Amino acid sequence: MPFHKINGKMVEAPVQPGQRMFSQRGAMLGYRGEVSFTPNLTGGQGGVMSMIGRRVANEDTPLMTVEGRGTVLFGHGGHHVHVVDLVGDTLCVEADRLLAFDGTLQQSTLFMGSQGGVMGIVRGQVTGQGLFTTRLSGHGSVAVMAHGGVFELPITPGQPVHVDPQAYVAHRGEVTNRLSSALGWRDMIGRGSGEAFQLELSGQGTVYVQASEEKL
Amino acid sequence: MAQFRLQGSRVLAVDLAGDAVKARNGSMVAYTGQMTFKKLSGGGDGLRGMVTRRLTGEQMTVMEVQGKGTCFFAAQATEINLVRLNGETLFVEADNLLCTEAGLRTGTTFTGLNGMASGDGLFTTKVEGSGWAAVTSNGPAVILRVSQGMPLRVDPGAYVAHTGNLNRSLKSGAGWTTLMGEGGGEAVQAEFTGEGLVYVQPSEKITFGGDV
């Protein structure tokens, strides 16, 4: 079920019987046809165990299940919406940036600390991203929110991309990320350039960056 | 030479080949290749620039970005306007200046009472030389031409920047209704005369003039 962009801040999605869709609670703007919205107590896919996992991981943005027949409009907070079509690959995104996604996608919570050990834990604290992130994989579409629109940067082996942690939105593909710091003596005496910490993304894939340094 | 281009309307991409640009502190959102970021001591050029910055409050914390690759800049999802300078002078509020090529000189000028009433402060930033500068505006800016005999009046809150040989003065549109508290909210305007271009944004900053 592809998302159809109405404008930069609103997407429309068709809903058919037997095809579920998940969206952030309260993100429905309008709908046509017979569509029901049920709050999703488990906060997404999987059973109670994955719900507990998400609660623990603080990646449990309230979701609702969208079912029925018709078309639904989604949008939230005036943020720009970007649609990512997954074809068997994976997308890592913060749960609070997820606007809506196909029920066909596999949802899981990823422990970021496993990438990079202690530095991974430091990264979560410094960037405000926390230790966990939501991972979606399979075939389907995802609508992601960002402040001020999104642009894509390709990541190829040997050419890592550095992103300001506040401007980072999501990434897809086989990408490892690590916190790189450019802390020097200048930062210690308060003469830093404001770019002391960066996320270094390397591997093969795409990173989505927003045109603002404002977290959602 | 640094190459300035727009990635969409809200992201500035600068291709660097070992040279440097000056940008607002913390405005980098992403980069490829090798980059170093260094805070510049002051913002204006040289020691004198630093002293004037301190005194005038027109300070923009600036960093120098140097390296090889592409660096992306953005500021709070504001629209970006590229301005090419060929020896002329660009006057811009420090808040609206995002990035300048290393060859451009930045300084501070006194705008006097004009600035004060418009909420812009007494001083404004001056950019001179040849090269690219990136100016941010809240919403897409329109560029209005001013020529001899065709002065332009803009709301001080919507004014972003200007280039060319322009004189700026403050005009009052206040009448007796304003005094009675029935003003139209457009009591103060900035008038530009001469030859040049004025950048106006579709949004108004909070100004003293906007209240009356």
Image (cartoon, helix red, strand yellow):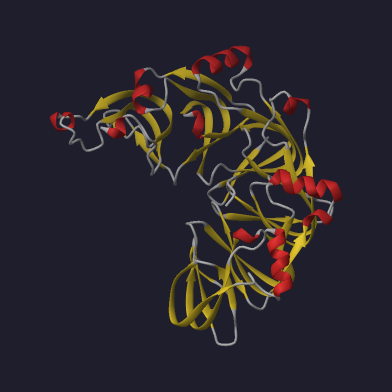
Question: Residue B96 at what x, y percent from top left?
Answer: 50, 34
Question: Residue B94 at what x, y percent from top left?
Answer: 51, 29
Is residue A45 something one can see in this rendering? yes
Displayed quadrant of residue A156: bottom right
A104, A84: nearer the viewer: A104
How many marks overall? 0
Displayed quadrant of residue B72: top right
Displayed quadrant of residue B111: top left
Q: Which residue reaches farthest bottom?
A: A17
Question: Residue B24 at what x, y percent from top left?
Answer: 60, 33
- Image quadrant holding the N terminus of chain A, namely bottom right
A26, above or below B37, in the image:
below
Residue at position x 57%, y 28% in the image: B130
- Give the side of residue B94 with respect to residue B40, left or right: left
Residue at position x 67%, y 61% in the image: A59
B138, B101: nearer the viewer: B138
Is residue A162 something one can see in this rendering? no
B43, B100: nearer the viewer: B43
- Give the side of residue A27 with respect to residue A210, left or right: left
A162, above or below B50, in the image:
below
Residue at position x 64%, y 72% in the image: A42
Question: Residue A50 at what x, y percent from top left?
Answer: 72, 70
Q: Which residue reaches farthest right?
A: A117
Residue at position x 78%, y 39% in the image: A181
